[in-house]
Image (tube, rainbow, N blue to C red):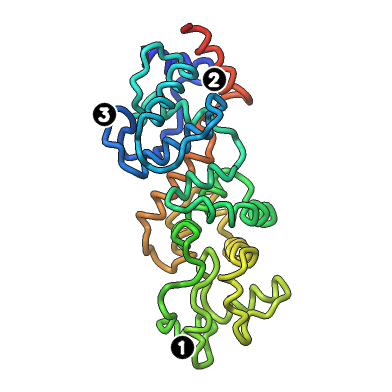
Amino acid sequence: MRAEISGNLLAHCGVSSDIVRLMCITGAVGRGAANVRDDVRTVQLLLNLNSPQSAVPLDLDGSCGDGTVAAIELFQKGVIGDKDPAGVVTVGGTTLTALRLGMGVALTEGKLQGICIHASPSLVAKYFAALLAGMQTGDIDTPLRQSHFLAQLAHESGEFRYTEELASGKRYEGRKDLGNTEPGDGVRFKGRGLIQVTGRANYTAFGKFVKQDFTTGDAMGRLATEVAFAVQVAVWFWGTRGLNLLADADNVEAITRKINGGLNGFDDRKAKLERAKFFLLPPHRNAPPGAVLHAMEAVSESVQ
């Protein structure tokens, strides 16, 4: 039954099995499953994003209690059309596919929370509007560009927790390639903003771009403390390094080298990119607009 319904859902969408296979959980969630906290929190979020079926959204507490299992069963029965719901979401299974299909197209605060699953809702809310505005001005305007951009920011900032480098910055002292030509420049111009921009040269160039001075007094700290500048400096860096073109080519290694100078944290960057793609990329390549909702309605009716 479940395999049949999965096939029906895809057929109604106007696709065969051409699903872009991206994962956002590492193990099963639901009744009798492993229920790793991050996986449970992700499924809870996906159910909320899909669910006009419940007036009260699930708490994103990472605990798979009776309410979460009941919400999974309700989705499996009411949306997928499973008359005997298992109450489990498996990696790559029908329910996870349907949850992905049921999300809207646009980037929302909820989707940003899904990408940055460890971030607090207050941090996501703090940066969401500025990120939307920044991506628009920076032509980071396709799902693939946004996936790469947000994945790199999520890594660099620890999912919005850090807008200033934790290290002292002394290792940048005397780095002429960063424009650090005066004593104390390493500490003074250490990494700040959501992309951790470093060096006097970058602070100066960004300041000229936004007609601000970030090189005197304690002004450099504004890249960390002011949301608009923390986002704008990341968008500026992205644009001046031509990273949209590398994102269009889906070249995460080249993007990482441009940002980091090497491949530090590469596995985490790739994992965050796959997660961002799950939430932002179209789940299939050739479905006509509105096909997902029509498919779910049709499949639900056909198994009643």
Q: Earlier in the sequence, mark 3 or mark 2?
A: 2
Q: Earlier in the sequence, mark 2 or mark 1?
A: 2
**Residue occupied by mark 3:** 32
- Residue at 48 percent of width and 17 percent of height: 78
Instruction: Identify the image quadrant of residue 122.
Output: bottom right
- In the image, residue 37 above or below residue 81: below
x and y percentages locating residue 265 in the rendered image = 37, 61
Q: Amino acid at mark 2?
A: Cys
Q: Give the crowd class for mark 1: few <14, some 14-19, many >=20 residues within 10 Å.
A: some
Q: Please, which residue is most extreme toward the right here?
A: 211
| Helix, strand or loop for disc 2 | helix
Q: Quadrant of the N terminus?
A: top left
Q: Give the crowd class for mark 3: few <14, some 14-19, many >=20 residues within 10 Å.
A: few
- Residue at 53 percent of width and 18 percent of height: 296
Q: Give the crowd class for mark 2: few <14, some 14-19, many >=20 residues within 10 Å.
A: many
Q: Looking at this view, is 214 or 83 the one in front?
A: 83
- In the image, residue 1 above or below residue 142: above
Q: Distance between the Cα atoms at labels 3 and 2?
A: 31 Å
Callout in the foreground (3, 1)? 3
Q: Amino acid at mark 1?
A: Gly
- In the image, residue 51 above or below residue 273: above
Tags 3 and 1 touching, CB below 8 Å: no
Q: How many marks?
A: 3
Q: Looking at this view, is 180 or 36 the one in front?
A: 36
Tags 2 and 1 touching, CB below 8 Å: no
x and y percentages locating residue 241 in the rendered image = 57, 64
Q: Please, which residue is most extreme toward the bottom here?
A: 183
**Residue occupied by mark 1:** 174
Q: Amino acid at mark 3?
A: Gly
Q: Distance between the Cα atoms at labels 2 and 1?
A: 58 Å
Q: Earlier in the sequence, mark 3 or mark 1?
A: 3
Q: Going by the image, does 299 lie left or right of 166?
A: right
